[in-house]
Amino acid sequence: MGSFLPSYDTGSPYLDGQVLVAMPGMMDERFARSVIYICAHSAEGAMGIVLNRPAANLNMPDLLVQLEILPEPDRIRLPQKVGSMQVLMGGPVETSRGFVLHSPDFHLAQSTLPIDDSICLTATIDILRAIARGDGPENAVLALGYAGWGAGQLEMELQANGWLNCPADAELVFNTAADLRYEMALRRIGIEPAMLSMETGHA
């Protein structure tokens, strides 16, 4: 496994806008086979959203009703796109908070963080209100909670081969089914998923 070198901009030690893919050696069970989009990474630490853990038994219309953004009778009037929007378990931290990764055609002053050219993060209830009205971004996924690392922690995990990383793009984040993102991200790094599962038997 040592032959696979991470393909990221060596000019920056930080991985904002990259995807982490958990390796078979990942020690933390909570992140086994995870694909995590890194929203922020600095000397102070990192935060990201798990992209391949759909929220069980929870969809966007349910959530809008639960948060009292939408009265129950109005859920049938929601645009189809809103009804099919993915709701993910974004990580073990602050699981009652919603974090929306979305296309850059939607921006709230002081609330929206542009991560790269094609993906932004907004974590206020106002974006959910806009989505319910049909005024939200063209592409979006909602995550409940996030994954967080303290100062230097992610760097240590990378050195221990817990993760590989590759650049993210809108196709992977918005247009790929959650259960296919792990294999897709591995292929982008240049690893065939079947090869990886064979190697796990020879630890």
Image (cartoon, rainbow, N blue to C red):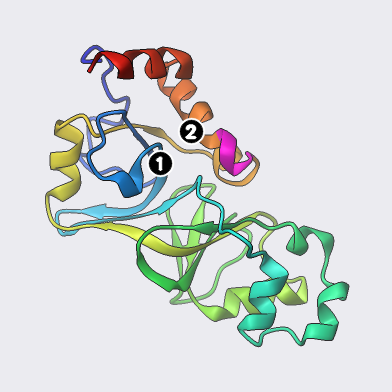
Residue 130 sits above or below residue 40 on the image: below
Which label belongs to residue 5?
Answer: none
Q: What residue type is labelled 2?
A: Tyr
**Does 41 appear above or below 197?**
below
* Secondary structure category for the residue under label 2: helix
Where does the magenta region start and end? 176-180
Q: Quadrant of residue 20?
A: top left
Instruction: Measuring from the top left, give residue 77's x and y in whole percent.
Output: 87, 74
Tag 1: Cα neighbours inside 10 Å, few (<14), some, or many (≥20)?
Answer: many
Residue 34, numbered label: 1
Viewed as shown, does residue 52 lie left or right of 29? Answer: right
**Main secondary-structure element of the magenta-colored stretch:** helix
Question: What's the residue at 77%, 71% (across, down)?
Answer: 134
Name the quadrant of the N terminus: top left
Q: How far apart are the two marked residues, 2 and 1, measured between alpha carbons?
A: 7 Å
| Relative depth, front residue between 199 and 114 | 199
Of the pair 42 and 148, the residue shown nearer to us: 148
Label 2 close to label 1 by CB (< 8 Å): yes
Q: Hey, which quadrant is residue 73 in on the image?
A: bottom right
Q: Which of 161 and 128 is in front in this view?
A: 161
- Magenta includes 182? no
Q: Which amino acid does label 1 sit on?
A: Ser
Name the residue carrying label 2.
182
